[in-house]
Image (cartoon, grey):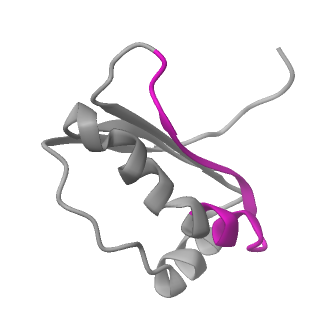
């Protein structure tokens, strides 16, 4: 399982527009074979922060998605901190 997780910072007054611009991309990703979960959301505390998470069944599913994914045209974030994690175990809490 592959997890992509992190956040981006954008100007507070454009955060909600930034998040909304990714709605179609998130919808498309969720329909792709191998997508476990994708979300791009406004942070509940920081008005500049956009949280993002992707969970993929395996590296091949993520590669297939990356080859076809076309993100929206948006201004660059002020800061990006996103990392990939390779999960070797998981289960219910």
Q: Determine whether 34 is above or below 53 in the image.
A: below
Q: Quadrant of residue 12?
A: top left
Near-viewer residue (69 or 11): 11
Near-viewer residue (84 or 53): 53
Q: Quadrant of residue 26?
A: bottom right
Q: Residue furthest bottom?
A: 68
Residue 25 lies in magenta, yes or no? Answer: no
Q: Determine whether 30 is above or below 80 in the image.
A: below
Q: Position of residue 10 (x, y in %)?
A: 22, 40
Near-viewer residue (13 or 25): 13
Q: Position of residue 76 (x, y in %)?
A: 17, 58
* Residue at the spot 87% in from the left edge and 22% down from the top edge: 92
Q: Position of residue 32 (x, y in %)?
A: 74, 73
Q: Determine whether 17 is above or below 5 in the image.
A: below
Q: Residue furthest right?
A: 92
Near-viewer residue (85 or 69): 69
In the rendered picture of this protein, how many numbered marks are placed on residues?
Answer: 0
Task: Report whether 53 appears left or right of 78.
Answer: right
Residue 43 lies in magenta, yes or no? Answer: yes
* Residue at the spot 52% in from the left edge and 39% down from the top edge: 41
Tell me which segment is drawn in magenta.
26-44
């Amino acid at each position: 399982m592959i997890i992509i997780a992190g956040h981006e910072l954008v100007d507070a007054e454009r955060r909600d527009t930034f998040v909304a611009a990714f709605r179609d991309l998130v919808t498309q990703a969720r329909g792709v074979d191998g997508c476990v979960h994708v979300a791009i959301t406004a942070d509940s505390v920081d008005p500049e922060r956009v949280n993002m998470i992707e969970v993929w069944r395996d590296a091949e599913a993520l590669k297939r998605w990356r080859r076809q994914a076309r993100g929206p045209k948006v201004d660059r974030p002020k800061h990006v901190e996103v990392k990939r994690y390779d999960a070797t175990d998981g289960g219910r809490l």
